[in-house]
Image (cartoon, helix red, strand yellow):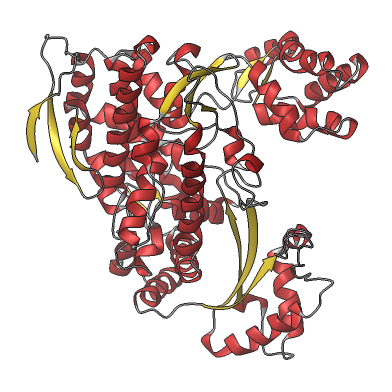
Amino acid sequence: MASQNSKGSAFQDNNGQEPIYKLFNDPIHGTIELHPLCVKIIDTPQFQRLRNIKQLGGCYYVFPGASHNRFEHSIGVSHLAGKLARSLKEKQPELNITDNDILCVEIAGLCHDLGHGPFSHLFDRKFIPAIKGQKVWEHEDASLMMFNHLLEQNPKVEEEFKDCGLINRDRIFIKELFYGPPKKFILKKEEIERYILSPLMNKRYISETEGDGILENLMDQRYISETEGDGILENLMDQKKYEIGEDDILNVVLGEVNEKCDLTPKEIIEPLKAEFPYTYKGRSKEKHFLYEIVANKRNGIDVDKWDYFARDGHMLGFSNSFDHKRLMKLARVLPVGESQQICFRDKEVGNLYDMFYTRHLLHRRACQHKVNLVIERMIVDALVLANQHLKYDGKKMSESIYDMKAYELLTDNVLYDILKSSDAHPDMEKARDMVKKVFERKLYKCIGTYAVPKSNEEVVKKSDDEIKKEIVASAQPGQLETLDLIIEHVKYDYGKKKENPIESVYFYSKEDNTKAFTIPKHKVSSMLLNHFHEMEIRVYCKDEKKKDIAKKGFEECLKNKKKWPQHKPCQTCKSTY
């Protein structure tokens, strides 16, 4: 790593000095430059722990090349975030993008994954729900807490923030860039009427009396902050204020409206969301496009994905037809309704479809690989067994998510912590045995996959226990138990569940680069997908000796076409659905 002066930047610190950027050699982006404040953040224990957290979780046990970590990915995202912000600034000086804006975006890109636990998404999406019984916490929550913890524990970083002229509003902006705005906000009765009911009434989706019914329903739901003191809570109730999220409101509204008109939920929701109060505090509505650079909540096109598509594909040995460098050069900010959004040249619509298809392939071929899923399940089983006994700064793993001093000690090394533990408790013995099975490749076996037909996704509503009981009942009597089986529900999509994400992207033309518009799928190609979501049910057997019995039981289940309907050929294109 070497140093060099910044390339013609107008940025100066409080002493009037230009910052000395550091050069990093990255296998994906080549030589990249990072601001000295970013370097100071990198050189903290809280950031350095990312060296020991695999980007793709258990994939390293399937793909030997998947050895990359959150550390290098975060540096890559910071680089791309600054590059995109500078590109927009150079092309459109009227946007008034400042050097502070760019630095904040770079810091957000660097810190967006600070909160990942052992084996990345395995920890927040599988381990924590296994302990808590539901998904109550996400790594973004910990990223926010870890960022605050990093600043508290490293006074030199705090000083550098001040030297760079970053104020409290900039810190809020950085957090919002990767975490988003407050999840909940308080609306008064008149605001509910203004932002939700009036637009519906104006478009004649509902009558005035139906509007009163929705308002009453919202009040009955009592969306009030329970964390407030008794006096404040009583005051809120008296004023009929309710702390609610957009989804809370819209779900109630949809329940009243959807049956009364021919519009889809999306067609009802999107205009309403545009009417909601602007809740971001770091930057004004005129600069809202900056929030789309690191973590784009609108359509998922952001530099976080651009880095991991390129990095994951490179390390896994997968080809990648998506070109983020070209897309970056053809990005512009244009007004869409009342907001400013990042838009792209119309000819790049194919490149964007390639981008989302790349995401789909990474999930299908790596993240959701049948061996990777079972390895991650076995790792989760080991962590659950060890949770009560393995402590970090006095906290259980499941408790550490609310204590960053303990959480920063948690990395992928937890498997070796389990192996090295001398705790003789039966649970720890089982946990050690489970880790050894992963290392020795003595894995649960996949005995079959059921592709859920798009014409009948009701089958996925069966509980795991129901599916296991059906398989056991279909197997040889007394030869198989439900405890021998594991059910995995696998979902593939383009990042927006059943929706086509390109429908949320705006484009501009060569003839007029000031007007934003969408491009319907049928105008791109008649060969594009009609569906953007599919599901599979995979069955695994824990006992090697029982796998053949379990497989026959599952095959017998699938013969019951009424309970397990099969794909039907499409009459127009002869494909299956």
Position of 75 relative to 320 (above/below): above
Residue 159 in the image: state x and y as whole percent.
Answer: 19, 19
**Quarter residue 383 falls in:** bottom left
Quick check: 7 left or right of 280?
left
Q: Residue at x 85, y 29 (%)?
A: 256
Query: Camera-side residue: 516 or 538?
Result: 516
Task: Work out which quarter of the rendered image holds the N terminus and state it.
Answer: top left
Position of 97 relative to 84 (above/below): above
Query: Camera-side residue: 116 or 239?
Result: 116
**Quarter residue 92 falls in:** top left
Residue 396 in the image: state x and y as whole percent.
Answer: 41, 51
Residue 105 in the image: state x and y as whole percent.
Answer: 34, 26
Q: Residue at x 47, y 12 (%)?
A: 286
Q: Residue at x 54, y 16 (%)?
A: 339
Query: Camera-side residue: 39 or 205?
Result: 205
Residue 249 in the image: state x and y as whole percent.
Answer: 72, 26
Residue 486 seen by the camera: yes
Query: Camera-side residue: 384 or 219?
Result: 219
Task: Work out which quarter of the rendered image holds the C terminus and state it.
Answer: bottom right
Quick check: 52 left or right of 175?
left
Residue 115 seen by the camera: no
